[in-house]
Image (cartoon, rainbow, N blue to C red):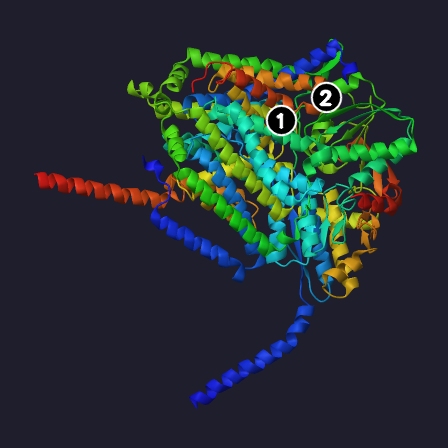
Amino acid sequence: MTRSLILSRSSFGWSAALLLVLLLVPAWAGRFTIYILAFVFVMALLAMSLNLLVGHGGIYQFHHAAFYGVGAYTAGLIAAKTAWPVWVGFCAGPLMAAAAGWVIGLFCVRLNKLYFGMLQISLGSLIWIIALRWYSLTAGDDGIHGIRMPELLSGSVTIYYFLLAVVTVCLLSLYLVYKSPFGVTLRAIRDNPQRCEAVGINVRRHQLLAIIIATFFAGVAGVLFVVLEGSIFPDMLFWVLSLEILIMCLLGGWFTFFGPVVGAAIMVTLRTFVGSVTEYWTMVLGIVLILLIFFLPEGIMGINFRNWSRRRSRRAAARAAEDTDAAG
Amino acid sequence: MKKERFFSVGQLLMWAGCLLAVVMPAAAEARDIKVGIVDTYSGPAAVFGNDALNGFKLAVNEINKQGVLGGKIVFTTRDEQFKVDIGLNVAKELVLKENVDVLVGTINSGASMAISEAVAKKEKIPFIVWTAKSENITGKAGHRYVFSTAENTAMAGKSAAVAFAKKPFKKFWIAGDDYEYGHAIADAIWRNLKKIKPEVEAIGRTWWKPGEPDLIPYLTAIQAAKPDCIIFATGGVSMANVLKAIKTTGMENKIPAWIHTATDHSVLKPLGMNAPEGVMGTIQYHYYYPETPANKKFVADFQAAYGNPPGFPAFNAYTTAQLIAGAYRKAGKIDKEKFIDAMEGLKVDTPVGKVEMRACDHQAVYPMFLGTTKISQEFGGAIAADIITLQGDEVMPTCEEIAEARKQK
Amino acid sequence: MESYVTVSGLISQFLVGLSRAMILFIVSSGLSFILGVLRVPNVAHGSLYMIGAFVAHTLAMAAGGGAAGFWLALVLAPTAVALISLAAERLLFCHLYEREHLMLLLFTFALALILGDLTKITWGADYRSLVAPPFLQGSVMVLGTPFPRYNLFLLAVGPVVALGLWLFSNKTKVGKIARAAAVDREMVGAIGINVGRVFAFAFVLGCFLAGLGGALVSPTVSITLGMDHTIIIEAFLIVTIGGLGNMWGALAGSLIFGVSQSMGILLWPQFAIVFPYLAVVIILTLKPTGLLKSVW
């Protein structure tokens, strides 16, 4: 019940304001700020796509980075190795990722929780091994760098706006997915799979569809990374990155809409700014996480929501009290 | 009265402002040179990152006693955690935010190549790779803004090939880490060895995952095939595992083995008296050889400052610092393009003698030392013995080969 | 390479795989135990394994580096790891048992980050290497192929640990309670047993095994930062294919991992890395909750 919050009306206002600020950033910010924000956009989209499964679907997608990598490698290889226009790669990336998501999903949806997660890690790692071992195609662990983008996407400000536009469209689409009857069913499955099964919902088909949608957006994030950095390398498909994305979701608040975005922003900022002061930034991250677990168990974005629900329940209680008073 | 005084303060400020405006350009001329270091300071490769940083610090302290162009060399470090994406993040931070004049680093070939393309080439900022050994960095992926002061896989492979050609081995087994470094080094040896001595034969190849903890099964299988010599294309953590496995399987002194940097003391020291003997290794630096005054001084200073002798990353980084200082002195001003022009063909003094930054491919020319591990009571462990020096021009790919490789790309 | 495969080579390869499986078993049985009793996916398990190896090295060196030092390290290093985990459990973990699985995963991840950096601060980045006592060095001939003595030792230790765990969980009261708590923790709480203490005990025992694995593996590998990464993913995959929380499952999983990898080297060396993952895929596709009965 408490977890079905999506996005309240006031949040819409906030999102519009945030978007406006982000649109104006290149006017005053330094080049590094523009770059790191663009990097946050990529990570945010990646985390958001995972959260469709983890937060809304209750699906333990433990190796989400594999699909991010598939999207990036598809776009990157098409740009680097073929004469086709890069736009072909941009479209093929997410589609390949979704296809990989569908195939791996077929294997995994029959399994529950941790079993699902571990099978998914294994299958995703097989893709990672392909990226790592197919030297003639992928250049192995060195990866391919300096992938050229069209003139249109060469300036850092242009890239920033391109990424911002794509991520905004993707987040809007994800929002529509959440609001749709499909999204409602997905959350119902998360909260009570047995009951859903009993009322005739095809649980596995819903989960598989969610996986396909999520991996598609992970593929989009992969393509955006190639646009931003011009590099592809096997670490993009390594399980460590998957764990990091999962942490972004949990950190920001996995039962909220914007939680993963906030989580991604915090992770990248911590890494960049604490990392420039001390080489022990991972310890700082660890301590932040532990404080969070103890004091903000719903994640950072969970605070608003908790206050809001407390207020609402207090109001409801007051109303109930009034009713009894009136009755008395 | 009061008003007048206020006015005079304003006047003073104005004069000061004018003075500053006149002095400023001069002061800018004498500013410090900012070096940004991107390297691995966490995980298994951190040992090399720390060693390189110490070598760099030592050189910078020496250089700053006289200063460079009236200023000093200052540096700031970033940990890329052996990850390409973090490497790109921090390299861009150093360039776009910290405005460093030169980027140096890293041990990770993938990160080095990514930074070379996305930062050095794009932002037109010189980038000197000091530990990563991929020959592609200054080979087919080389360009104006990237340099290397690391010995690369092509050099290591060619030096091994030159050395093997003089030995009676015919049947080789190639084994190593299944990643780019392993394959690159094996390819470099094989293509050079085949050229010099066409009758050699590779009777088998084995690749294991980098960092594979248990190599005994692999070595047992190789032993059964009885090759004349085993080429181990391995490095980092796997190296110590290979050496341990050579000892445990009783292969030492039975089948000759070669590993690039097997004679590195950061690898041999932890093994102590249990290091295998008779393993051949190539490396560009030993702290105990050559026994020249320059090397002795470097080692003594390093030991005094950091408590342990310098390894090859420290040597590379020391050379890098000397090159940076030398190039700025030669260029006469802090300018990126002039710096690059000055770097090309620059020769500096290092603990092993003069080192040249080759103009055609931006690769530092190092002599290579081929040694064989031998237990020394004096050192409390294995060191390289019977060291043969292979001159730089003997082990480097030629400028024509480089030009050819770059054209193919 | 195929042409060099001999029967004795195959057997020695198999034995090496088995001895590798023993280390994997010791580490993953600890992980499985914690998963079973506490329902916690302990990501910090790998860090404790790494700390076990580092502590073992420090202790052995402090004791002079001889055989006595090795045995001392083998006993004290896991104990030290157990103490660290006890502190973490009492100070932090014990307040979190009612939380969501993913939150516990987040907690253990945070713990892994902190322990990883603490290891770096304490021991630095240098490679270390522990020396086995003289009578465990070198190799003996097994069917005409040299086989390392230390691996024989591991082959002996594995079953001893398995037996110990079996005796503990079937013959002692605490063990029986822990097993019961794994199946139904409310029930155990309802009959008046202090579940918190059982949980603490289970967590510490599991971590002790991680430390033991680290100490045991240290003579065969370089002790370095980053050791935690390689083992943790293997351990998780092993407990999954065995059946979460099932100790015998961890044993089965370890054997499959160890042997499939060492045999994979002979059959298809280029792709030996694929075999463990492939094993997981095949097993979980055929048996979605692992080979043996899972408590999950």
* Residue displayed at 51% across by 21% down: C240
Quarter of the image that includes the C terminus of chain B: top right
Classify residue B387 by image quadrant.
Answer: top right
Q: Are marks 1 and 2 on the same chain?
A: no
Who's the residue at 67% across and 66% down the image? B31
Residue at 55% in and 26% down: A103
In the picture shown, does residue C7 fall above or below C112? above
Q: Which residue is mark 1?
A: C218
Where is residue B256 shown, x and y percent of the image? 83, 25
- Viewed as shown, does residue C103 lie left or right of B191? left
Residue C133 in the image: above or below residue B95: above
Residue B197 at x, y percent in the picture:
92, 30
Q: Chain of mark 2?
A: B
Quadrant housing the N terminus of chain B = bottom left
Foreground residue among B315 and A199: A199
Residue B200 visible at all: yes
Q: Secondary structure at mark 1?
A: loop
In the rendered image, which residue does mark 2 sit on?
A: B218
As measured in the structure, the alpha-carbon distance from the residue carrying label 1 to the one carrying label 2 is 19 Å
Q: Residues within 10 Å of mark 1 (few under 14, many from 20)?
A: many
The chain carrying label 1 is: C
The x and y percentages for residue C31 are 50, 24
Which mark identifies residue B391? none
Mark 2 residue element: helix
In the image, what residue type sits under mark 1? Ser
- Give coordinates of residue C114: x percent, y percent: 50, 38
The number of callouts visible is: 2
The vertical placement of B396 against C285, above or below, is: below
Mark 2, Cα crowd under 10 Å, few <14 / some 14-19 / many 20+, is many
Q: Amino acid at mark 2?
A: Tyr
Q: Residue furthest bottom?
A: B1
Is residue C236 in view? no
